[in-house]
Image: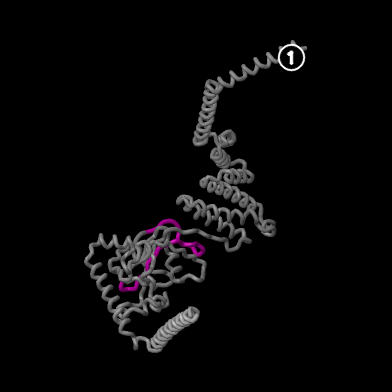
Amino acid sequence: MQEEQQIISENQNSDSIVQQTQSQDYESQQQTEVLITDNKNTGANTSTQEVAMNDQTQHNEDSVLSQEEQLSEEAKEKIREENKWKNFVPTEQKRPIDEFFDLKSISPIREERIPENNEIVKYVIEDGKGSFIGLQDEVFYKHETRFDNGQLVDFSEKRNAIDKFVMSDSRFHDFYKLIFKTMRKGEIAWGKFPKSSHNGIYHSSTHFQNKPEEIKAQIGDDVYIKFSINNIKRNNQCPNSNSFECLEEYLGQIRSICKELMDDGEYPNAQNLYSRVYASYKNMSKVLKDSLTEEQKQKRDEALHLLSLNLSITHFKRNNFKDSIKHAKEALEYNKENPKAYFRLAMSFKGNGQLEEAKEQLVTAIKLAPSDKSLRDEYKQITDQMMTKEKEWYSKMNGFYSSKKMSDIEQKDYEEQILKQKLTKKHFQDQ
């Protein structure tokens, strides 16, 4: 009897499980049919529940907006910092979609037309300095792009991002290159670009196409871009290293550009350029080297001497004193009569802590230029520095000899001597 009840109970449980499974399958089938129907008739058969949910969501959004409008600017900023504002974009990363700028408020110090495309207008806000951006340079800049009604082209455009533009790369915009060629480091300017320049790329974007028709009707074809040139990595190259005349012209360009770079503290960039032109002169092809006249050979040695000195300076500025010493010594291989080369070598030795060697090089430099006061002043400084170090050393040694530690050592040595005498005396007595 108990076995029959157990079997009946198990059957009932089994039927219950089957019913639950069938119920779940039916619900899943119903949901699948609803989804299929919704996909076939998008927006036509929206359920009452979905409509109610959408209404509630819209109501919540309207409520949030009304609350935001009532907040003070300070309160809004706090909400932004806490990242709780629904559509907020952090200031340091993005701009809000409704941010406008009155382009009529631009007050340029001058207006320029781009020579290669007279339709492009540049409104200079702040002048830069140094040489113009070259066709082989890399530009590091900030920018913002706006339609002619003042609205940002892309609302997710980053505020403080520094972009990199490679002038020689064909993948970058040509109309950017045209205006960059007229700009210098530190310059800030607006560029007005007609459709013939940007080819409508900004107006064909999805962001623009999704705008309401009445907004699109208010936007013209021109685009305004504000450029701020943060830095320029110079990348000049010699177009023909097999021509000595071309190498001479290239050397002149590098010297002029590197002077600016050194003044701006751009030592790595200057070092790379000096190294490049040094390699062109040093590793000159045999055909070109054999074809040089005596005058050209002398110019080559002078160039290698000058470049070695300049490389020594760039390494010295970067605290690479061993490399600075190496290049200063190379400079002396091409000219042993230049006191500046010995001075440069002396400074490199000094930076590396080799004061005695630095002093020797200064002695040679002073012999070659006895009227140069700066050499004698440097010699005196190094001599004083060596004397100070010597005094410090003696002071430390005197302190050591007069210290308790030294007294303990002397006492221990005395005790050891007494012990040795006793052992020696006992040894002879035993014999």
Question: Who is closer to the viewer here, 210 or 38?
Answer: 38
Residue at 28%, 66% (x, y): give it: 105
Where does the image place residue 238, in percent across and percent down from the top left?
57, 61
Residue 167, placed above or below residue 391? below
Where does the image place residue 277, in percent across and percent down from the top left?
58, 55
Question: Who is closer to the viewer here, 56 or 384?
Answer: 56
Label 1 SS: helix
Q: Most extreme residue toward the top, as rendered?
A: 429
The answer to whether residue 431 is visible is yes
Residue 229, placed above or below residue 371? below
Q: Most extreme residue toward the front, as rendered?
A: 1
Q: Most extreme residue toward the right, as rendered?
A: 431
- Which amino acid type corresponds to the residue marked 1 in the rendered image? His
Where does the image place residue 8, in percent across and percent down from the top left?
47, 82
Task: Answer with the quarter of the image where residue 57 lies.
Answer: bottom left
Q: Is residue 323 left or right of residue 228?
A: right
Residue at 25%, 59% (x, y): give it: 74
Task: Answer with the quarter of the image where residue 182 lies.
Answer: bottom left
Mark 1 — residue? 427
The answer to whether residue 339 is visible is no
Residue 14, placed above or below residue 68? below
Residue at 47%, 65% (x, y): give it: 165
Circle 1 packing at 10 Å, graded few (<14), some (14-19), many (20+), is few
From the image, which quarter does the C terminus lie in?
top right
* Magenta span contains residue 175: no
Task: Answer with the quarter of the image where residue 150 lies.
Answer: bottom left
Q: Identify the magenta region.
A: 127-150
* Magenta span contains residue 142: yes
Where does the image place residue 312, in percent across and percent down from the top left?
56, 46
